Image (cartoon, grey):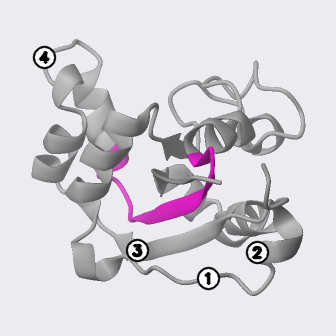
Amino acid sequence: MSQERTLILLKPDAVQRRLIGRILSRIEDKGYKIAGLKLIQVTPELARKHYAEHVEKPFYPNLEEFITSSPVVALVVEGPEAITVMRSMMGATNGRAANSGTIRGDFGSSRQMNLIHGSDGPDAARREIEIYFEPHELHDYSLALSSVLVASDE
């Protein structure tokens, strides 16, 4: 089965609320591999690069203020259909509308402070991973449990 990588950011509200471990556990419990992981402070320059399509929009100043307010955890998650699966695990953007069982549904109650970012497609994933990670910061390894997570013919 083809493996896919996606960028995930645990946003300042997740860090401040001490949800890092609980969210990482959900990703690992699902059987997905963490190929890169770091705690970083997003600068205004990095925010503008990541959110380039939003810089001129009226809501951007609040977005930049939020994403630069505290460190974030940046990670690259790898696994079958990682982009779609991670976005499903995240839940609806607005925590008040997100289903129970999703990260935002279980922990979130805001549209703006929504705990987690995930790439929305393969092109975005490649672009975002390159923004946050150097190639040497990503690791290619096999999980010991791989053979019991997904059937070989899937």
Q: Are marks 1 and 2 in contact (CB under 8 Å)?
A: yes
Identity, as a three-letter code, of the amino acid under mark 4: Glu
Disc 1 marks which residue?
Answer: 142
Q: CA distance from mark 3 to mark 4?
A: 28 Å
Query: For residue 33, what is the image quadrant?
Result: bottom right
Q: Which mark is residue 39?
A: 3
Is 51 on the left-hand or right-hand side of 87?
left
- Quadrant placement of the N terminus: bottom right
Q: Residue at x 78, y 49 (%)?
A: 154
Report if residue 2 lies within the magenta region: no
Q: In this picture, which residue range is highlighted in magenta? A: 67-82
Mark 1 neighbour density, 10 Å: few (under 14) some (14–19) many (20 or more):
few
Please name the amino acid that badge 2 sits on.
Answer: Ser
Residue lying farthest to the front in this orientation = 153
Specify the label residue 146 is tagged with.
Answer: 2
- Disc 2, SS: helix
The alpha-carbon separation of the residues under discs 4 and 1 comes to 42 Å
The Cα–Cα distance between marks 3 and 2, rounded to whole angstroms, is 27 Å
Q: Which residue is mark 4?
A: 56
Q: Are marks 1 and 3 in contact (CB under 8 Å)?
A: no
